[in-house]
Image (cartoon, rainbow, N blue to C red):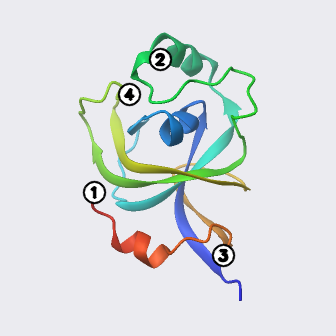
């Protein structure tokens, strides 16, 4: 039986969402702090940050995976591409990806099958059938510490 599960989600433009899931980007810069700690789905927004792509090209040495070409089909848009654990929100961090003023600190990135859905500002809930990702969310929620 399918039931709906609501998981906190953040929408992030490409190529930054790719960098979080595949490239080792361990922090997401925001103008607002968050109290959320725990599982977080990563939604790839519909827009592409060309300036951000240029920055990643210039800083490829800090990436944990090869940056795809700008027009690569590896960049998905308008849906869930993975999940992380959000473990902190900081106003200072040694990560080379931190620009501030606030940084949402992520650990344990994991790609997920692409799940198309609308994005939103701030953190938002995504609902989907609980068997879509075949994930034990009770275990995921219980294991929120690094």
- Decide if residue 94 is in sight here: yes
The answer to which of marks 2 and 4 sits earlier in the sequence is 2
Give the residue displayed 37% in from the left and 53% down from the top: 86
Q: Nearer the viewer, mark 3 or mark 4?
A: 3
Mark found first going from the N terminus, 2 or 1: 2
Q: Earlier in the sequence, mark 1 or mark 3?
A: 3
Of pointers 1 and 4, the one earlier in the residue sequence: 4
- Residue at point 44%, 78% (across, down): 138
How many C-alpha atoms fall within 10 Å of the one at disc 2: few (<14), some, or many (≥20)? some
Q: Quadrant of the N terminus?
A: bottom right
Q: What residue sits right under mark 2 in the picture?
A: 60
Establish if 69 lies above or below 16: above
Q: Against 63, is 137 above or below?
A: below
Tell me: residue 129, above or below residue 42.
below
Of the image marks 2 and 3, the number of the one nearer the N terminus: 2
Residue bearing the label numbered 1: 146
Q: Are marks 2 and 1 in contact (CB under 8 Å)?
A: no
Q: Residue furthest bottom?
A: 1
Residue lying at the far top in this picture: please name it. Answer: 58
Residue for badge 3: 131
Asked if the residues shown at circle 2 and circle 3 are in contact, with their CB atoms under 8 angstroms apart, the answer is: no
> Residue 114, percent across and down?
70, 52
Q: Could you give the CA–CA distance between mark 3 and mark 4, rounded to whole angstroms?
A: 34 Å
Q: Residues within 10 Å of mark 1 (few under 14, many from 20)?
A: few
Spot occupied by residue 18 in the image (x, y as percentages of width and height): 57, 36
Q: Measure the C-alpha gap from mark 2 to mark 1.
A: 26 Å
The residue under label 4 is 97
């Amino acid at each position: 039986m399918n039931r709906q599960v609501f998981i906190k989600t953040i929408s992030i433009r490409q190529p930054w969402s790719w960098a979080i899931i595949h490239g080792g980007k361990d922090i997401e810069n925001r103008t607002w702090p968050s109290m959320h700690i725990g599982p977080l789905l990563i939604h790839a927004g519909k827009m592409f940050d060309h300036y951000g792509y240029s920055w990643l090209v210039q800083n490829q040495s800090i990436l944990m995976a090869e940056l795809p070409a700008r027009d690569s089909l590896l960049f998905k848009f308008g849906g869930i591409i993975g999940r992380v654990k959000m473990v902190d929100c900081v106003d200072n961090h040694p990560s080379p990806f931190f620009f501030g003023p606030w940084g949402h600190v992520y650990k344990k990135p994991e790609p997920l099958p692409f799940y198309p859905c609308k994005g939103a500002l701030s953190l938002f809930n995504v609902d989907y059938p609980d068997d879509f990702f075949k994930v034990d969310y009770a275990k995921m929620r219980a294991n929120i510490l690094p």
